Image (cartoon, grey):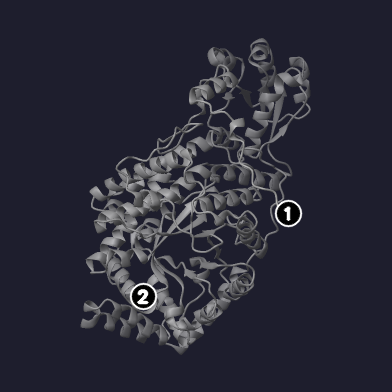
Amino acid sequence: MTDAIRPYPWEDFPPHSLDAWKEAAQQVLKHTPLERLTQHTLDGLSRPPLAPKYAPPQDTSSSLLDARRGARISQGGWSIAQRYTHPDPQALLLDLSHDIQHGLHAAWIDASALSSVHCASALQPLCALFDGQDIPLYLDAKADALAFSALRIAAAQRASIALSSLRGSWCLDPLGVAAATGSFRDGIEEAKHHTLALVRWSQQHTPQMRTLRVSALPYHHAGASAAQELAATLATATTYLRWLCEADISIEDAAQQMLFDLPVTCDVFVEIAKLRAMRLLWSRVLSYSLGRSAEITPHIHARTSPRILTQRDVWVNLLRATTATFAASIGGAQSIECAPFDTALQTPDAFSQRIARNTQVILQEESHLGHVLDPAGGSDTIEHLTEQIANAAWGLFQSIEAQGGLPTALQQGSPQQAISETAHKRLSRIAQRKDLITGVSAFPFLKERPPQPHPIDHNALQSRLASALQQHTLDYPQDAIFRSLRSSFEAPDNTQDPTTLLLSLVHAAHQGATLETLSNALAIGQRSEVLQFEPHRNAERFELLRDASDTYLQQHGQRPQIFLVNLGPLPQHRPRADFARQLFEAGGFEPIDNDGYSSPDEAVQAYQNHLTPAAILCSTDAAYVAMIPQIAPMLKAAGVQHLFLAGKPAQNEAAWRSAGVDQFVFLGCDACATLEALQQALSIRTNHA
């Protein structure tokens, strides 16, 4: 017997107007303006606490509205991907063999791991491991993507693996590499030639491989906003589209060759909207290019942003990565890479890799996040934000196109300048603790126990790899292979049919060419320099302060300390004492706390039991007015070298400085600069960024 489904009693929830909500909210906020609840992004977009009803623009086609929704690749929703960075090829194979049996759907091998693979025979075990597995393999060789593609093709042929069965991407991204490294290593024209060669060959022989990786990582890691990130990504994809269409490859075929690689942060609403906006923007480009509606859904690979990961209190990275993975899944990414919690600290070990992989398994199998297509669609907040980000990114994209496209813009330096300014704004907010980083600038834990390190004996590893490479070059002299390869590049067929370039590389790989030989042979064009995008993590400045504190602890047996001069009873001093404690702990200073002092004499007497070089006054404004003229000079006479006060001095600044207060700290002050200056004054560190 089953109960009949009863209609939900909506009549119990009468409708309310927006004005009624504003009135109720204002009563709770009291004297705080309602506008204070509106957040503003670095793109200048407004995020009100309650979004107005969304209505799409009248000129928006149904195909563009559908484009933002995306498409799932399986019933589970997305492909669970993992990145591998271990430089030891033997350890790499062991990790992959284990993970393939425990929920892995896609494997990304990072350049740091690929650097140990010097020839086709060394790559053969990796290819054989994936033979017969329905698991895409992505070899992220960055600048050596074309040369590594030749090694992988030769390795697959040696292992008698059908090329048509290869899945994944060749990860060729010359524009992304130029942005990250500061140059087109072989010039822009050679980059176009290499791109066309691999695309043409891949279309014929490896139809399940996407040739081009359109990566937002160089721009994101340098500090780009969501709109700047999408504009650069869209400009990259449009450039590749233009290159391929000039070679008579159809727009549809060219679009199918691209894989979009987007980092995702913890800002859930923005990241959901960003992924939806990416699909909307790409559909707009394809529709304009085709002159009709485009029904090509971009394959979006989302990864945890390396910018948000920390080296301190790394366990909090579990929350960051989970939140980013949640946003990526709701945003409709086809594959997702959840970063292990110790990524910023060391090469991830088996435990952290397993936790990262199982995070996705739980979100898929227990939370069922992938069972609904575009679950955020229809939300007024998400729809407005999607449209705002898309419009802002489109305007920036048009600016890049007006300069002649992304290659020209990179050479002129305009994207670098704009993103640098955005990064400065973000880092300033972090330094002022307006944007808090849990475990670093908020709730720092000076007694934290980092995860057990698993050091890699790089000297022994390099010795072993160098010995293997030396033996290989003795067996296969590279000079002769290099000359033969260069000669083949100059043959008439190579200039007329771009695929012969790749065939020559594959032939050389079969002859024993190393990755270095292939890369050197490809270095034909003139290097073209661009201004490099400098990557950074949000927590770096605070982490440098903590590093200096750790060094001081090792040298002196204790951390640098600061005495909290708490004036008055607990309710009077505790709010500012808590603020001061967290601020100075973020800089590696151990606060000496107490329950408060009723008089200046009592406070100074307590300080004399510690004699720290720095102290901070914590109390209410009224207590400061009454006690600062007396207690400040007494503390200075007792030995305080650097006297701080928690709070803004307002009109009392001159008088309190005259009494002996050196600096004021408050919400919105530049905490990083304050802590760096104090560490330098106390010779805890000799310089700072």
- Horizontal side, residue 234 vs residue 347: left or right: left
In the rendered view, would you say 191 is above or below 292?
A: below
Q: What kind of element bears circle 2?
A: helix
For the image, the number of numbered tags is 2
Picture disc at residue 202 = 2
In the rendered view, would you say 108 is above or below 207?
A: above
- Horizontal side, residue 80 vs residue 616: left or right: left
Look at the image and tell me whether residue 222 can be seen. no
- For mark 1, what is the residue? 1
- Check disc 1: other Cα within 10 Å, few if <14, some if 14-19, many if 20+: few
- Residue 143 in picture, x, y percent from top left: 39, 66
Tell which of 327 and 476 is nearer to you.
Answer: 327
Cα–Cα gap, marks 1 and 2: 58 Å
Tell which of 40 and 29 is nearer to you.
Answer: 29
- Check disc 2: other Cα within 10 Å, few if <14, some if 14-19, many if 20+: many
Residue 560 found in image quarter:
top right
Comparing marks 1 and 2, which lies closer to the viewer? 1
- Horizontal side, residue 110 vs residue 353: left or right: left
